[in-house]
Amino acid sequence: MTDERIGLEITTRATLLDCLHRDGSRLDPAALSGLTDEGWTALIEMATRHGVAPLLYRRLKAPPLARCVPDDARERLRGLYLNTAACNVRLYEELRLLLLALRAAGIPVIVLKGAYLAEQVYRNIALRPMCDIDLLVPASRAREAWGVMKELGGGYRLIYPATETLIPSFGKDFVCQKPSGFAPVEVHWTIRITGLSDEKDCMDDEELWQNARAVHIAEIDTATLSVEDFLLHLCLHASYQHEFDCRLRVLCDIAVFIERFEPEINWSVLCARASHYRWRKGVYLILYLASFRTGAAVPAEVLTALEPTDLSAEMIEQAERRLFDAGTETMGMASNMVGFFKSGRLGDRARVLWRRLFISREEMAYIYPIPPGSWVLYGYYLVRVRDLIRHHGAAAWDLLRGDRKLAETVRRRAALREWLFKSDAQ
Amino acid sequence: MLTRDARLQIPEQVITRQVGDETILLNLETGTYFGLDPVGSRFLELLGAEGTLVAVLAKMLEEFDVTEAQLEADLLRLTDEMLANGLLVTA
């Protein structure tokens, strides 16, 4: 990347962050007036990549900023805003039918993440792009929920697990989509945070259902998580689940959520739960970034209470870097690749490789459409080798050839991962 | 040719939704969508209540500072575009 390009990237990032900040006075209209055509293109592209183009549109159409925005930039942003609205209208229509069917079958549902946020927190479905629908059902009703969805018009097809008998005995959710489908539907039966391998890796299902709140979404009476659980879920999903590879949108989600529920949030409950489940590091880091970068109203005493004792500037920088670079090729690198390349020792690498190639029969049946008891499954290990080479071969080859930039990315990511998942001192 | 007396309605497969100060119409069958600014949103609201272009025209003339010729031309253009995209139909 040339110096000029890096300069543009830095300026664009600063402008976008000022546009997204809860404090409207941070954005200097002069900074917008000074943007060149290239600057506007960069700003709109960055906002799109981070899932915040509709928020940028809303911010820039309000006076006095509106007069600083060229017509073509405004029209492009309006197009993105309307496109989000159109996508979400379809998605909410699908959700409405789903919720009706599950309610008719007597299956309790909790609506998670985007579908709740867009309608009830942003209060304008055009402001929050969504790429799927996330629902939570009791584990005991998960198979039945899939049965209901299979019978619905449009013909949902299972994507994961590939073998439906694994619902709900293996994994944490099933993912399905209509053939003409607009977005996949993820039906969770537990909120498990991948990567946290000890007994504290799940939010307590019983507690989640006990604390759930009644809400009206997609014109249907349904439920969502309690305020504290919802905020915790956003934090855990961004930090431990995606290791901060989750775009700036998540910081806006947190900031808008806190603004909407500020008087109701019981921060003591949130802090106690984060400490009890050893989630302090991830929760602290994402709340800190939301507070610092988008002005989320996280009380200072909450940040103090959650701050890990071994926090370093490098970890903050790396988490932030991953947020900013989210969605780019190197950032999307699988965590197993990081595990493989972080160790220089051949024996360690061989162990990681072995573990990832020869996953359990249940994991195989989750990915490939073969029952876990079938002998045919063994043949699929060869398919797995082929798939791994196809997905990660190019990056692995670059790393083996000594690509310094990629190696540095791996090193940083491995350091963040190690810090994040190392139990924090209580 | 569309006339002032035409009776118009939103077809069944079209969903309308308020998003901020705009209204979006989405044809679920074709995926075509259309965004209406606050003035266009008011037009759609009145069309739902009044049914005909001429009645909407009369109401909007009371509400907006615009000449009848200008408003009629604008509404006919908008209506034509929505008809062409299957977001409105003649009853």
Image (spheres, coloured by chain):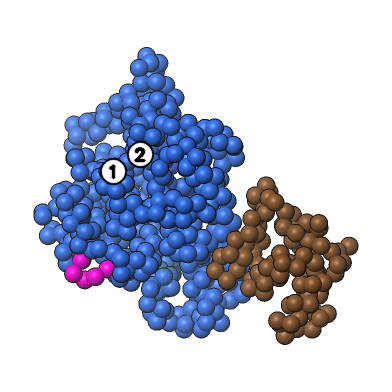
Chain colours: A blue, B brown
Q: Residue furthest bottom?
A: B65
Q: Residues within 10 Å of mark 2 (few under 14, many from 20)?
A: many
User: Residue A283: image x %, image y %?
Assistant: 25, 57
Q: Residue furthest top?
A: A375
Quarter of the image where one finds residue A28: bottom left
Question: Which badge, 1 or 2, is on the more N-terminal residue?
Answer: 2
Task: Specify the label residue A138 is tagged with.
Answer: 2
Q: Is residue A415 visible to us here?
A: no
Q: Is residue A54 visible to us here?
A: yes
Evaluate whether label 1 is on the same chain as label 2: yes
Q: Residue at x 29, y 58 (%)?
A: A228
Element on which disc 2 rests: loop
- Does residue A232 sit above or below A379 in this rendering? below
Q: Dot 1 falls on which chain?
A: A
Q: In the image shown, does A414 or B43 lie closer to the viewer?
A: B43
User: Residue A34: image x %, image y %?
Assistant: 49, 80
User: Residue A31: image x %, image y %?
Assistant: 45, 80
What is the magenta range? A298-302
Q: Residue at x 52, y 78 (%)?
A: A62
Q: In the image shown, does A156 or A180 lie closer to the viewer?
A: A156
- Does residue A264 sit above or below B87 in this rendering? below
Task: Specify the label residue A205 is tagged with.
Answer: 1
Q: Residue at x 47, y 40 (%)?
A: A102
* Left or right of residue A259, residue A415 in this image: left
- What residue type is disc 1 on? Asp
- Judge whether residue A301 is colored magenta: yes
- Quadrant occupied by the N terminus of chain A: bottom left
Q: Confirm or deny contact between disc 1 and disc 2 (CB under 8 A).
A: yes
